[in-house]
Image (spheres, coloured by chain):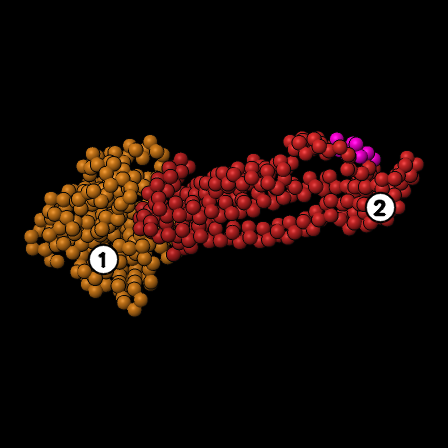
Chain colours: A orange, B red
């Protein structure tokens, strides 16, 4: 991560600012995230964690500064290339963002369909990834009939099915019980092992201790500190 | 990919049944009204054409006219400008023609002891002269001949009728254009409601890397399907109405001499395609605005 020039950086931010009208959401953020890192973005509610994630996948435009994703400068990306950029990401939202009128299968398959994959490949991969998240028996269910933990597993399945380079997870365990949260974390660790970069926005200190990794701490839109936190490290800084 | 888009369009239609039904009903009503106009014009044009083809002047002769007089009269008429052919119809022949035309009302002739019809000459004009003004002037010249008792130019009113129909046709084009625009506007707004109700789904699609085309094409299919269904429903209703109404009008006003025709297969296909275009255009306008946001 930061102070590691020998690494290949997949995400680079230079003096990034973002405003919502007069409100400054992010102030002068400069950071680098290397490939295959496990990074937490921590901070209290309203610190700018979600905004920072949104800037990465162009969910929000950058007001000022430069963001580079895998070498692509987001300020210069043409509109029609945005879908390609987004396929580099697997995004897990706090509110899951599953389509309620589509089955579990269709929700997960959507990523590959959008990428133009062949139907046979889609069927094979959807089944495989749902098996991985332990939801292979709920293929035909619809999201409203699932529990929060189950919906989050589907969201993880959707995020990882396209083999993205970067996983962005916004409070992925925020509304889950301990057991479901553990399952989700285990899945994200698996993604890391397969070579992706995992970025989790959370204010859950216990989660950070349990997992370990780099932590970028935001306070009122400013990057206050970056540290490495050991797994099961009881006296965490944050 | 096309199969996937088509499948998604069909699924979406069923999932948003109410809004889609509103769109289809709107299209079908517009198609019904527009097609009714077209049907009216097609049939009135046919009636006018059939009248124009049979356009002639009937000159009824005075009773006392002899063979020499008839010969002179024929020469006099033939020498007039614009006269093409003429045919003498004796009173006996006229009666037998009338009997043949009214074979279903033959009882009317049973008690007829005297032939009340006069001898006559049927005059047809040169094709190029068949304009209403020239026919009027020719009829006046014939009527001025001493052997002529009366000239009947039964289709005198046809010209005026044709002019009225032309005006109707112009009004029809204007109304058709207005309906076309109004339908597109209504369809666009209904589709906008459908899209708005699915804005979250569209947003999620974009976030997972779907291109605008991936999002738009199923909606386009929906528009085309809605247009096609709207056209089919509108035309079926029109056909049913046509069957009931045409049978009565043919009997009442034309004594079975003229048969109304429904729209030709080419016209039906054109209406279907135009309706599909309306559905697509409505989608296109809505999506263009929505995806810009």
Kindly report the distance in space between the C-alpha atoms of the residues bearing marks 2 and 1: 100 Å
Whole-percent x, y for residue A135 in the image: 20, 37
B32 to the left or right of B115: left
B12 to the left or right of A210: right
Residues in magenta? Answer: B88-96
Measuring 52% from the left and 50% from the top, which residue is drawn there?
B180
Give the number of the mark in front: 2 or 1.
Answer: 2
Of A188 and B24, nearer the camera is B24
**What residue did someone put label 1 on?**
A49
Q: Label 2: chain?
A: B
Q: Which mark is residue B142?
A: 2
Whole-percent x, y for residue A62 in the image: 33, 60
Q: Label 1: chain?
A: A
Within 10 angstroms of label 1, few (less than 14), some, or many (20 or more) residues?
A: many
Of A106 and A182, nearer the camera is A106
A202 to the left or right of A63: left
Measuring 30% from the left and 59% from the top, which residue is drawn there?
A14
Q: Which mark is residue B31?
A: none
Q: Is residue B225 visible?
A: yes
């Amino acid at each position: 991560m930061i102070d590691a020039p020998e690494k290949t950086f997949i995400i680079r931010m230079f003096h990034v600012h973002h405003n919502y009208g007069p409100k400054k959401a992010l102030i002068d953020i400069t950071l680098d995230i290397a490939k295959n890192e496990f990074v937490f973005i921590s901070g209290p509610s309203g610190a700018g964690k979600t905004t920072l994630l949104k800037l990465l996948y162009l969910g929000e435009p950058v007001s000022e500064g430069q963001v580079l994703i895998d070498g692509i400068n987001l300020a210069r990306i043409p509109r029609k290339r945005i879908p390609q950029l987004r396929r580099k990401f697997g995004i897990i939202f706090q509110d899951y963002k599953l389509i309620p009128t589509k089955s579990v299968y269709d929700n997960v398959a959507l990523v590959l369909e959008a990428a133009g994959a062949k139907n046979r490949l889609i069927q094979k991969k959807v089944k495989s990834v749902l098996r991985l998240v332990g939801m292979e028996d709920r293929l035909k269910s619809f999201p409203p009939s699932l529990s929060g933990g189950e919906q989050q597993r589907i969201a993880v399945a959707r995020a990882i099915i396209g083999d993205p380079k970067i996983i962005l997870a916004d409070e992925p365990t925020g509304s889950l019980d301990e057991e479901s949260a553990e399952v989700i974390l285990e899945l994200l660790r698996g993604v890391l092992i397969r070579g992706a970069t995992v970025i989790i926005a959370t204010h859950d200190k216990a989660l950070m201790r349990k997992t370990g990794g780099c932590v970028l701490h935001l306070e009122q839109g400013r990057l206050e500190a970056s540290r490495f936190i050991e797994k099961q490290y009881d006296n965490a800084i944050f | 990919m096309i199969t996937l888009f088509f499948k998604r369009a069909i699924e979406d239609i069923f999932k948003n049944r109410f809004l889609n039904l509103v769109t289809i009903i709107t299209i079908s009503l517009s198609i019904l009204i527009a097609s009714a106009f077209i049907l009216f014009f097609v049939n009135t044009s046919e009636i006018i054409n059939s009248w124009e083809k049979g356009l002639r002047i009937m000159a009824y002769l005075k009773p006392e006219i002899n063979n020499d007089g008839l010969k002179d009269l024929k020469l006099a008429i033939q020498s007039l400008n614009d006269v093409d052919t003429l045919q003498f119809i004796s009173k006996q022949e006229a009666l037998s023609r009338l009997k043949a035309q009214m074979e279903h009302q033959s009882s009317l002739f049973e008690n007829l002891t005297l032939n009340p019809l006069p001898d006559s000459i049927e005059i047809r004009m040169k094709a190029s002269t068949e304009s209403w003004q020239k026919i009027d002037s020719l009829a006046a010249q014939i009527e001025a001949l001493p052997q002529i008792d009366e000239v009947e130019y039964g289709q005198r009113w046809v010209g005026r009728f044709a002019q009225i129909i032309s005006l109707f046709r112009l009004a029809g084009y204007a109304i058709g254009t207005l309906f076309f625009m109004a339908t597109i506007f209504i369809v666009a707004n209904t589709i906008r409601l459908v899209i708005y109700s699915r804005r979250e789904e569209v947003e999620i699609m974009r976030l997972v890397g779907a291109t605008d085309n991936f999002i738009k094409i199923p909606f386009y299919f929906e528009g085309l399907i809605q247009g096609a269904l709207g056209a089919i429903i509108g035309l079926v209703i029109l056909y049913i109405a046509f069957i009931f109404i045409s049978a009565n009008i043919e009997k009442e006003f034309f004594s079975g001499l003229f048969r109304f025709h429904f729209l030709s297969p080419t016209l039906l296909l054109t209406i279907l395609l135009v309706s599909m275009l309306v559905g697509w255009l409505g989608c296109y306008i809505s999506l263009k605005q929505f995806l810009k946001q």
